[in-house]
Image (cartoon, rainbow, N blue to C red):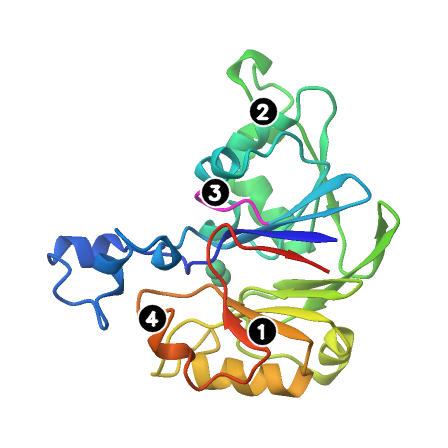
Amino acid sequence: MEITFLGTGTSHGVPTIDCMINGYSTCPQGVCKLSVTDPRHQRTRSSIMVEWNQYTVLIDVSADFRQQALRENITKIDSVLITHGHADHVTGLPDIRSYTKDKPLTLYGSEETIAMIRKSYSYVFDSNTYIGGGIPHIETIAAEDSFELFGKTVVPVKVGHGTLRGCYGYRIGPLAYIPDMRTIDDENLRKIEGAEVLILNCLRRQREHSTHLILPQSMEFARRISPRQCYFIHMCHDIHYELDSKEFDSFMEFSYDGLKVVI
Ligand SMILES: [Zn+2]
Ligand SMILES: [Zn+2]
C-alpha cells in the first residue's frame, strides 16, 4: 500500500492569506514567509491518495485538488472517500470531472456528508443539468459501517468535530487516517488500535481549539495508539517543521506535501 500526502495544511493552507495581508508580520514563527523558500512549510489543504492492487483511492478532494493532481501526476482515480463536508475537504470535487469520463466515480461518505455535498453541488446531481457543462459523474454511497473496496475492508471511524454528526476518519488495513478530530469514543478508538501507520490532525502548537487536536493532545493521542509511525497533518502556519518536532517520540513526525509512505 502506498500513501501520497497530497496536502497537509489546515483549512487556510500555508502560507495564509491573513498573514500575507499583514505583510507576514503576525506569523507566530515566520513559517508563512519561510514557506516561500522551504517547500516543507508550504501546506495545501489536507488529503491523501492511497494506492493498492493498482487501484487509486483518494481520501477527500481538497480545495487544492487541481494543484495536487498536477503536482503528483495523478492519471486515474478509482474511488473517493470523504471524511466530512467542510469546504477544505470537498471543494476540489468539480475538478474531479476529468477522471469520470469513462465511468462514474464512486464516492463514499456519511449520510450527513453526502447530504452536504449534494446540497453544495446541487447542479452535479440535477438530472436536468446540461452535460456539456462539464459535470463530474459521481455515484454517492452513504457508508458508516465497514465495506469492501478493491479487496480491502474500509472501516469508517466516527469522530467528534464541532457540530457535525457524521464526521469520520478511515481505517484501511494497516492505515488509520484521521484529519479532523477533537474527540473520539471508546468504540471508535478500538477501530484504529493496532494501526501500523496513523495519520492524525495537529492544528497548532498551543491554545486549545474547540474542533481540533493541538500538538500536545495529538502527541498524547499518538502515544495511546502507539503505531509504528505517526504522521501529523492538517497543520496551520503556527507549526514549524523543525523547531516543533524536538519533543517528538521516535515514531512521530510532521508530514509535508508530496511525502510518500509505503506500508
Ligand atoms: Zn479540515
Ligand atoms: Zn473540518
Q: Is residue 75 above or below residue 204?
A: above
Which residue carries the number 4 mark? 240
Label annotation for residue 98: 2
Residue 194 appears in view: yes
Label annotation for residue 91: 3
The boundaries of the magenta stretch are 60-64
Residue at 45 percent across and 51 percent down: it is: 88
Say what amino acid the circle numbered 4 marks.
Answer: His
Give the alpha-carbon distance from disc 4 to disc 1, as whole Å.
26 Å
User: Which comes before the other along the chain, label 2 or label 4?
Assistant: 2
User: Which comes before the other along the chain, label 2 or label 3?
Assistant: 3
Element type at mark 1: loop
Which residue carries the number 1 mark? 160
Which SS type dominates the magenta stretch?
loop
Dot in front, 4 or 1:
4
Say what amino acid the circle numbered 3 marks.
Answer: Thr
User: Which comes before the other along the chain, label 4 or label 1?
Assistant: 1
Give the alpha-carbon distance from disc 2 to disc 3, as whole Å.
15 Å
Q: Is residue 5 left or right of residue 31?
A: right
Element type at mark 2: helix
Give the alpha-carbon distance from disc 2 to disc 4, as whole Å.
35 Å
Could you tell me if the residues under marks 3 and 4 are in contact, i.e. CB atoms within 8 Å?
A: no
User: Which comes before the other along the chain, label 3 or label 4?
Assistant: 3
Dot in front, 3 or 4:
4
